[in-house]
Image: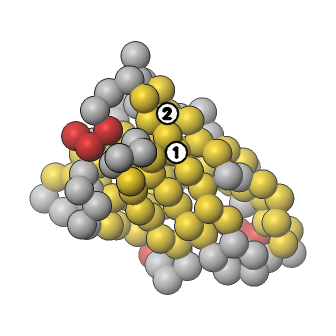
Amino acid sequence: QVLLVESGGGLVQAGASLMLSCTVSGHTFSTYAMGWYRQAPGKGREFVAAISRNGEDTYYTDSVKGRVTISRDNAKNTVYLQMNSLEPEDTAIYYCNAGSVIRGRYYPPIGNDYWGQGTQVTVSS
């Protein structure tokens, strides 16, 4: 059974930084691309960033480019999301998932089995 566990969320002021981590167990971590999504209050879940299996390719939504860096350590079965210059609009629950990159585009997993439970990020103004 695959298990994804996020950590690192919290309450910070605008302009601060946070690093989120997602540790995966129960499957071969390096065989999956990994992604981060977020869901703000009253909104749908949206893509934030993704990284290929070997970490060479990364993908970001426009609103976080230049402020967010995704990385992974396959030896530790962990994917990271470094977030700088946080804005109140970044307030959301952040989820990691194990998906696929096909022709330069990240696809999240179908169903809930390869999603974490989320970590709350709150940015005050």
The reply to whether callout 1 and callout 2 are in contact (CB within 8 Å) is yes
Residue type pointed to by label 1: Cys
Direction top: furthest residue: 1
Residue type, label 2: Leu
From where the camera sits, is residue 18 visible? yes
Judged left or right of residue 48, residue 83 is right
* Quarter assignment of residue 29: top left
Q: From mark 1 to mark 2, how far is it between C-alphas?
A: 6 Å
Q: Position of residue 54 (x, y in %)?
A: 23, 56
Specify the quadrant of the image occupied by residue 7. top right
Q: Secondary structure at mark 2?
A: strand
> Of helix, strand and loop, which one carries label 1?
strand
- The quarter of the picture where the N terminus appears is top left
The residue pinned by badge 1 equals 22
Vertical relation: 91 (above or below) 30: below
The residue depicted at 84 percent of the width and 72 percent of the height is 13
Residue displayed at 63% across by 76% down: 84
Count up the numbered dots.
2
Quarter holding residue 14:
bottom right
Query: Residue 24 in the image: x percent, y percent?
Result: 44, 35
Report the side of 88 relative to 52 (left or right): right
Residue 5, given in percent of the width and then of the height, sits at 56, 35
Q: Compare residues 44 and 93 and report the one nearer the observer.
A: 93
Question: Residue beneath label 2, please?
Answer: 4
